Amino acid sequence: MKRPLTEEKVFKDPVHNYIHVQDTIIWRLINTEEFQRLRRIRQLGTSYLTFHGAEHSRFSHSLGVYEITRRIISQFERSGYKDWISEERLLTLCAALLHDLGHGPFSHSIEEAFAMNHEDWTCRIILENTEITRILQDVEADFPRKVASVIAKTYEHEIVVNLVSSPLDADRMDYLLRDAYYTGVNYGTIDIDRILRMLRPYNGRVVVKESGMHAIEDYLMSRYQMYWQVYFHPVTRSSEIILRQIFRRAKELLLQDYPFRFMIEPLPDLFRGEVTVEQYLLLDEALVQTAFMQWTLEEDELLSDLCSRFIHRKLYKYVEIENLDADTIGEIRRSFAAAGLNAEYDLEIDFPSDLPYDVFRPGEGFDNKQILLLDREDNLREISEVSDIVRSISGIHRGRYHLYFPQDKLQKALPQLPPSIARIFAK
Amino acid sequence: MKRPLTEEKVFKDPVHNYIHVQDTIIWRLINTEEFQRLRRIRQLGTSYLTFHGAEHSRFSHSLGVYEITRRIISQFERSGYKDWISEERLLTLCAALLHDLGHGPFSHSIEEAFAMNHEDWTCRIILENTEITRILQDVEADFPRKVASVIAKTYEHEIVVNLVSSPLDADRMDYLLRDAYYTGVNYGTIDIDRILRMLRPYNGRVVVKESGMHAIEDYLMSRYQMYWQVYFHPVTRSSEIILRQIFRRAKELLLQDYPFRFMIEPLPDLFRGEVTVEQYLLLDEALVQTAFMQWTLEEDELLSDLCSRFIHRKLYKYVEIENLDADTIGEIRRSFAAAGLNAEYDLEIDFPSDLPYDVFRPGEGFDNKQILLLDREDNLREISEVSDIVRSISGIHRGRYHLYFPQDKLQKALPQLPPSIARIFAK
Amino acid sequence: MKRPLTEEKVFKDPVHNYIHVQDTIIWRLINTEEFQRLRRIRQLGTSYLTFHGAEHSRFSHSLGVYEITRRIISQFERSGYKDWISEERLLTLCAALLHDLGHGPFSHSIEEAFAMNHEDWTCRIILENTEITRILQDVEADFPRKVASVIAKTYEHEIVVNLVSSPLDADRMDYLLRDAYYTGVNYGTIDIDRILRMLRPYNGRVVVKESGMHAIEDYLMSRYQMYWQVYFHPVTRSSEIILRQIFRRAKELLLQDYPFRFMIEPLPDLFRGEVTVEQYLLLDEALVQTAFMQWTLEEDELLSDLCSRFIHRKLYKYVEIENLDADTIGEIRRSFAAAGLNAEYDLEIDFPSDLPYDVFRPGEGFDNKQILLLDREDNLREISEVSDIVRSISGIHRGRYHLYFPQDKLQKALPQLPPSIARIFAK
Amino acid sequence: MKRPLTEEKVFKDPVHNYIHVQDTIIWRLINTEEFQRLRRIRQLGTSYLTFHGAEHSRFSHSLGVYEITRRIISQFERSGYKDWISEERLLTLCAALLHDLGHGPFSHSIEEAFAMNHEDWTCRIILENTEITRILQDVEADFPRKVASVIAKTYEHEIVVNLVSSPLDADRMDYLLRDAYYTGVNYGTIDIDRILRMLRPYNGRVVVKESGMHAIEDYLMSRYQMYWQVYFHPVTRSSEIILRQIFRRAKELLLQDYPFRFMIEPLPDLFRGEVTVEQYLLLDEALVQTAFMQWTLEEDELLSDLCSRFIHRKLYKYVEIENLDADTIGEIRRSFAAAGLNAEYDLEIDFPSDLPYDVFRPGEGFDNKQILLLDREDNLREISEVSDIVRSISGIHRGRYHLYFPQDKLQKALPQLPPSIARIFAK
């Protein structure tokens, strides 16, 4: 069952031109229900409300990650690098293809709202007797466990884990290129061919030939720009906030036995934290959007208002503030309540830099978060030791407080707010 | 209310780089519920099942059509062409922006299934007291009617109608570029700047300066290639067929009072042909997909099988046949029935060239389907008189019969089929 | 000496991103004097006077042809096609790289002016003891002869000849892409990856898998458009005409022992048809342009005027005429002479379609000018049998007569011309 | 004579798609001998020896600078910014178009070799009765002086000077884009549309709207990368060094009355520092290359060797050294001499960061080298105050010593060098 396809299959892809499938197993995995479900999960969550082109799915991203991994391995094999373990080719490709399998609808928001983790779900889907599990077992009985352990970063051969997950992994390279392509933002145009040529397997990890330093600098700058231009865009943050508020409100209502005009499986179990794998696989963004659309007609005003905002894109406005302490926050919330606003729902405070995105910060944390350069004498150095640019970026702690609020409601309440508070929102 | 915005607003767009909004009315129209709904309707229906990048929405296409129209008009005004009526600028822009407003989910398929027409819906949404209607009335009381009449091609000033709808209109130019971009197919890369520079308003219609002939040839070749490579792709046709079968089956069941495990507003009224504008606006692709996903669990095997096929992308296979007469079709259907297959659902016959797509065919039909060249002495000639290439394309009546069927079911029934029929599907 | 490089070398290339060199021999060939000379020969001759971006050299084109050939062969080998002879890899790559080695400055014009042939020169440079010869001999004594015979299309293994020279060869693919890139004209954007995947070695020639037909149609349309938009552009033709007139005049003067103010080796021998290989290698476009620049100061008015026109881009104007017979031509020339114009130099008649460019015309001539499609049952069919588009293009005999003339001189002579003649040029 | 063209003319340009010419004066200036000469001067000097695509000329760059300036002004006028002086439109366009007119062949190298300055030559060509001068006088008698004073940065209206020359001027924007396009290096892909939309005329200078900060960061990063990847590339430096050595040697020989086998006007006067404008206009890269080619046959071994190296691209090799003091340099030179090498010609020391390229360094020097951001309250701030990234780049003083030498000669002399010196070159 490890056999190659008799003829290579291709997918037309705007980013990589073609995705090349050469193994029967990969072809079968792509055609499973579980993998096809990724077509119904957007790669960038609510970013399409900011960048109308960003409707691309995790399906296409997953194919892209697979393709980049395939190219890296194919180059490792062509060059005959001795630190690469060629028996691990298929395992690495499967892990690369499947690494995002567990993402739910609007995943970062849903993960925050229900304290879930998409990697756990990926592993469960791989292991718990799905179509995926059965295909992987065709390779060998233990293969599903191996794939899951690569994703959980516990697999014995570090080089495989490193290829699938590191600061220079195929995941990051694909999403930079793909998100740049679909948003139309120019900043993600990294020279991926050059980067790929510069990668070397070395002592259980993927390192970079020293002469590739400028390409890596450029890659890190692209990431930096994409984070601030796209991933942290305040309009996207606004929509994520509303999304989380909808989940919060719907859960409150459910636990209060509110009689929903519309409810759909498996949302109740999701809200109660009791979904099975089978139920989880029913979840997609169509279902969530449909629920929201129907809830615009619910009697609970808060829920219906939030859903209208999300569906019709009447998002919260925001103001930026340089500094904000706990006292001021308390004061704002109190005066909001006094002015008849909802102190919890009508104000959200966001400080983008503490998001779970992984801007590269050398020196902080584990080895495998670092990018290492390999010089001609086979010495390794962490890139920020060598590159002034990388050192400069790494030190930057950018970010400002953003206060999000419903402009229409606030406008009405403005006369009731103390002038010092009103001034903040009057900008 | 015709006033310009104090500062131009832009949307980042991968195809046109930026969409420039300069009028308050345009800005307000974009922010209506009805226009935002177009985000939830894909531009290319089920093509994303063939080209995974093709997830782009009618929202982005509509902005693109608006932008191209804006550029054409701005060039007409800069050049001071006397055949352009500058008072009609805002009307033309509104009609360009709104021309696709009435598209429903998977619109071509739904139109066929329920004998509806998206242009009628566009006009109804513009006229029947929606947010759109009220904003247009802010220009002048009669403005909604004017916009609708441009879309219905009955407006008094022919040049406006021609700009919004003709073989060289902004609609076609945007979709070629956009569909090529999102599918990743190279064929749609027309030189739009050059085409725009060659357009002239002349006697109530938009014609082309003769020296632009090669650019038009290239544009028509791109259309030709896009039709055969993308729009008529057999995998897309297969998914459209299944989609229509689902609608057909669900309607049958509804009319038979089948007890649906899951049903959602406004599908019953849609199936009965009784939807109001308000209900119609609830329809989007998320709702349709959610219904299909839930119906995979219905007891009716035909419905649940069709929905599984669509949702999990287990589509029908096809064979191509050069010639096919009514007798043979009858024979195939009869032997299908005899072999225990469903003679209606398990076989669909498709002849792509008779689809409602408008490949350019000079000489057939109305004036305003023709592209006219304007020479230096102000003579008009239809392009195929001048261009050998266009004449060649126009004469081509390509197309073959495609038979679509469920491969797994057919495989089982194969021994029961007469050899002459079995041979057709054994290819 | 057939050994691979210890580490692959790359050239950054805007068209193919990187050119990959993997063999010592190829690397050494690129670094010879003779190959470096191609940097000083433009790929598109005088087209830079029409398209200012078209300054690219035969050096970059030759690298591109090599790179495409390398990719084709590498795919043949990966797929293990039995009709490919893997021993011929290096020979094929050398022939692909060197196939343009014999081009002189402004080669098509110089070939016409002095009845030379660049392929003969390529073979002579390969065979007559140059740096190239010596490197090829390092492979085996007979290797220079083999390479030359591939270029002369006499090599015993037809598949090698076919790869280097056929209607779908790497030469054509590279120049379409490259000329489109550097001129900025969009029409040359063929999907080269798809074409390459569709090629198959079959019975001594390279054929195309049937499912690649649309990609080939698109490729032929691109060629068609590039010919008419770029290669036959009347402004380029005008500059080529002046160039040939300069050569003609300088040769006349030399044979008359005219005392040139400036002359430079090896032009006199070139004009007399007596150049050696060593002399030929001194020829480049810098030398020719420098001679022309200096000749702007010659006493011979005709020569200095022609050189001024070329150097300062004061080209001939042209008029287009549908039909033109020998009688009319005679009449025009006579009245030119009578009006004091130079009947030979002040009028050039050009009919672009009879240029030595090879628009694809099935049915005319040799087998190896045809593109063959291979279907699933291994039948071969010539593409125009299958493709309506290709059949349409093939029948087209476009072209009009263009009369080129010095506008300033003609303007003065106009009153002396008979009205019927004057009218032709007054357009 | 300030009249617009009756119909806009365009040049096809790969970088800006089309260059739009709307004024008769601009059209006529482009068609002068002096401006056409820029076709024969490469934009990037000897960089084509490193990046084979970089054959683009100062002609195309000058058109590009004109086009960007035209777009900036057209936006200033459309937005009606009061700090823009619309009477200065034509003057600004002429200065933008002509600003590079005085560049000689391989200009940076020739400027260093003969202590010349291309801006002086630009002004002389504009003022000293050339075709250019006469056309400019058609606008008004004083117009040539005005154009020259804009280029010399002394014109009375600072906004005009600032538009033509500042850290965000059209010159820099065009060369980043163009050099990236022709070399194929990805780093220069700035979002020029966005930058242009962010520019504002303000108090005599062009500033940037604050919300454009990220686009400017990206622009400065692109410049940084282009400097290190392209402009300071060691292979290019090697060829520039050889070029300057050729000029040095040829001048020495001329002053010693060496009997040149080949000499051409106006090189002798150039070497003696006595060229007139008329002579200067004869200079182009074809002439220089032709002289070098002919000099490969000179008897003076040093000159012929240097010329061979340049023409046949057998460049100097280099080693990089972190630190290098005057003593060590002296020691190296002495041991070179002792080992029979040419202590002057066989060793060149280069420290790239001290080149005359203008990496942006805030705080150093004049106002008009700074980029200023304009916030909503009309406050100006220098960008590095606001942007951490810019502050980081600005502090970087990168650069290492590079020693260039003829590898073949050095190899032979190696045994004669002291081990401490030999070790440096043995890397």
Image (cartoon, coloured by chain):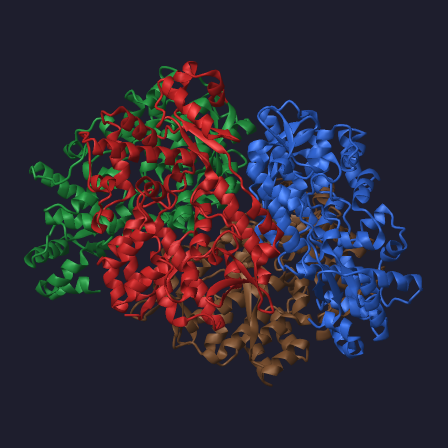
Chain colours: A red, B green, C brown, D blue
Asked whether, in this view, residue B34 is left or right of residue C127, the answer is left
A256 to B322, vertically: above or below: above
**Residue D132 % position (x, y):** 77, 39
Near-viewer residue (B343 or A150): A150
Say if B67 sits above or below A199 in the image: above
What residue lies at 14% left-to-right and 60% top-to-bottom? B410
Q: D189 or D282, which lies in front?
A: D189
Residue A214 falls in image quadrant: bottom right
| Residue for point 14% across, 64% down | B422
The image quarter in which residue B369 lies: top left
Q: Residue furthest front?
A: A327
Q: Nearer the viewer, residue B94 or A414?
A: A414
Q: Is residue A319 visible?
A: yes
Viewer can see residue C415: no
Q: Residue at x 64, y 52 (%)?
A: C48
User: Given the current orientation, which residue lies at the most extreme bottom position?
Assistant: C141
Q: Is A286 on the left or on the right of D43, as rendered?
A: left
Please state the horizontal and vertical placement of residue B64, each as a whole percent of the image. Answer: 43, 36
Quadrant of the image for the C terminus of chain C?
Answer: top right
The quadrant of the rendering that contains the N terminus of chain C is bottom right
User: In which quadrant of the rendered view does residue B122 lie?
Assistant: top left
* D120 and A218: which is toward the camera: A218
Whole-percent x, y for residue B379 in the image: 49, 35
Q: Is residue D409 left or right of residue A386?
A: right
Residue A363: x, y in percent? 53, 53
As drawn, C366 above or below B14: below
